[in-house]
Amino acid sequence: MGTENRHRPGRLHQSNKPFKSRHASKNSLKEKSKGKVNRTAIKRSGVKTVGKVDRRNAAKLEQQRKREEITRLHRIFEGRQGAPKIVPVISLCPDTDVHVAIASLYRSLGQEPPSTPYEGSILDVERFKQKLQLVPLRRNFVDVMDAFKVADMAILLLSAEVEVDQFGINCLLGMLNQGLVAVTPVVQHMDKVAPKLQASVKKSLVAFNQQFFPNEEHLFTLDNESDAMGVIRYVTSQRPKPLAWRDLHPYLLADEVQFEPSAHPEYGTLKVTGFARGNPFNANRLVHLQSFGDFQLDRITSAPNGSTGNDMDEDEKLLDSPIPEEQDDLVAENEPDFMDNEQTWPTEEELAAGEEQMRLMGRQMDQDGKVTKRVPKGTSAYQAAWIVDSEDEDYSEDEDDDEMDMAMDNEDDAEPADVEFSQSSALDDEYEDIVLEEKGGYKDELDPEEEQRQYQQYIEARQKEFKENQEFPDEMDTPIDKLARERFARYRGLQSFRTSPWDPYENLPVDYARIFQFENFKRTKSRVVTQAIVGNVKPGTRITLWIKNVPKDAYAAYNKQRPYIVFGLLQYEHKMSLLNFQIQRDNAYEEPVKSKDPMVLHVGFRRYTVQPIYSQNTNKGTNHVHKFERFLHMGKPSVATVYGPIVFGKVPCMFYKETDNINEPILVSTGTFMNTDVKRIIAKRIVLSGHPFKIHKRSAVIRYMFFNPEDVAYFKPIQLTTKYGRVGHIRESLGTHGYMKCIFDGSITQQDTVLMNLYKRVYPKWNTELWKGALDSSEYSSDKIITD
């Protein structure tokens, strides 16, 4: 029997209407079969199926790697040569006592507690083969923040009788924002509470702790030796939580500080001894001293470990020394070369006119420092102080035109030189030089009531400005007495805020020539972080850092009762650049926060006084333009931009507002470091508004946006919008009072408002300085407990 050949229809075969197709018509069947193609099988080449045995082996290797990492971290703290765990002890309530808590821990091990108050001590726990470096902290906010930057564990002292005060709340918020550390909550004065109420008190304290540390369910006491031993067991068994931004850097908590003066009387070599932690220290990199800045290392040597039990002192060994070609310099900013700009050398006539103008201004300083002014005879010193010099007057084009017209009229009536000389001598006889009152001697101090009244007026004005900005964002009235094209000369119009081109290198300020820019920030960061892992100084080693050219004040600031910390910098972290921080406003602060308000910036281990500018945190546009924010809004993420030293990694940041008390700063906003993008354009928007005067279908006559026809012609190319969503443009100017005929994409109503958006790029001010408020060692004393 032969093979039977059957016809197979292709993709162009006509599909006929099947029998009993219900309500399906030919058109509906065509719609269903539209775009029908013959599917081909997808080849999955290169995709390997992992078997069960391979998956088990991969999981086993990953588990082994994690165990080795945990063992490596624990090995730093174990054994006689191991580094001690840094455990700060902080009092969150005004009636708790740090020394009583530390003495209970010592007595539980049968050891004598330290006699010196508020000085750090090392508790040797032989039972658990670890050492604890207990750091008692005063109620000083800066000391608490510094200690928790390097802490491995922490003991929080709570009271069973008194609630946590504002200082304790500020400290807890600071701990959470800069990086979470494993904590051990301990309650004191529980014996003073009635036995029936102790369970409820413990329950409320645990609930309070879980507001800040949700996973913490323990609450310890130190009433007897067994309870104190439980605290020690818990602290030694816990593994320190890693802090990504801290572990990238080497850091050290000083046990001993010495100073060797150099040839310069005010500078010398600072020798800081302690246990190295984090990444290895590198002598080619800079180190940062709190409140004093960045310095170079002379060398790194080993230091004897006093806990080894050997009577013989160990020899000091050189661990690392800088290589001159590879050592980082102390140059933080570029020196702008002003000769690169366009040069226009003044002519001889312009130089002579300038000298004549300076002479006629009549304002000069005597050798005694007194200010003199040339005024008409008979003028008192008080009246002379109110006479405005030509340099202080605003430039007016109309006055300049009038002067030019008068000069043209007098060209024909030129007088001889001797006549001009006689007139100038006559003018000299009519004027005289008067010595003004010195500004330093003028006292304008107000009484406290008047000062308080003016301060309240200032606060009310800020509140009013904040409310107006919320109700009418960015709206501005066009000045009547000044041309709009002069008042808004630096502004431009954009057809689309997201896509219209804007050159990021156009008309940059001089400050941009002082900062550093990365060609590829991510690649540089990856290289710098990888290089920081390698070093000769292993973590856990007791070393001495020889820091050269340190001012004597840095050694004078050392106090054994306060934590003294040294952080190592990564490469390029000393260079100045433009820093962008992604922040969000704190809900507890309700006052308006305006751009360029002075703040104290805590970023990682550094603190600066800054005046940030805020902008929207948007990534929608292709032109990298972001809208400037006059105020920092609640519940809305924003970006704060300042000049500052370069930062690598997701470093936490906090913006505080200073108060009279160093221990009562106000937390304004928190966030993380974003990037150092100098091409990020921050555009300030202003909105000019006009009112419809006459409306005819799609065209309308608009007034009150401009007040002269020249401004209408100047801003004619810019697009118009309305509050009800219409889009249009200016057709022509009408009359001489700024009326203009506009055309829109639809009819507008009489209650609508016509808007014109103008944009100008803004930049932060170069006012970043190192914050030195940490040198204040005063304690928090607002809520002291008074005992009889």
Image (cartoon, rainbow, N blue to C red):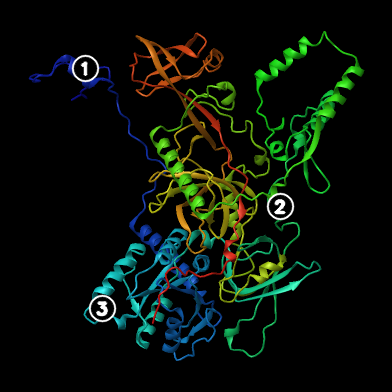
Q: Quadrant of residue 289?
A: bottom right
Q: Is residue 517 visible?
A: yes
User: Foreground residue, 543 or 1?
Assistant: 543
The residue tagged 2 is 331
Q: Secondary structure at mark 1?
A: helix
Characterize the local packing of mark 3: few (<14), some (14-19) or many (20 or more) Cα atoms within 10 angstroms. Answer: some
Q: Secondary structure at mark 2?
A: loop
On-image quarter of the C terminus: bottom left
Would residue 255 appear left or right of 65 to someone viewing this image?
A: right
Q: Earlier in the sequence, mark 1 or mark 3?
A: 1
Mark 1 or 3, which is nearer the eye? 3
Q: Quadrant of residue 388?
A: top right
Would residue 104 appear left or right of 250 to someone viewing this image?
A: left
Q: Residue at x 70, y 79 (%)?
A: 316
1 and 3 marks in contact (CB < 8 Å): no
User: Foreground residue, 56 or 426?
Assistant: 426
The percent coordinates of residue 246 (x first, y second) are: 52, 62
Q: Residue at x 68, y 33 (%)?
A: 392
Q: Amino acid at mark 2?
A: Val
Instruction: Identify the disc placed on residue 30.
Output: 1
Q: Earlier in the sequence, mark 2 or mark 3?
A: 3
Classify 199 as above or below 313. Answer: above
Instruction: Determine the CA span between mark 1 and mark 3.
Output: 80 Å
Would residue 171 appear left or right of 364 to someone viewing this image?
A: left
Q: Secondary structure at mark 3?
A: helix
Q: Residue at x 67, y 38 (%)?
A: 510
Q: Amino acid at mark 3?
A: Gln
Classify 648 as above or below 41. Answer: below
Q: Earlier in the sequence, mark 2 or mark 1?
A: 1
The residue tagged 3 is 198
On-image quarter of the N terminus: top left
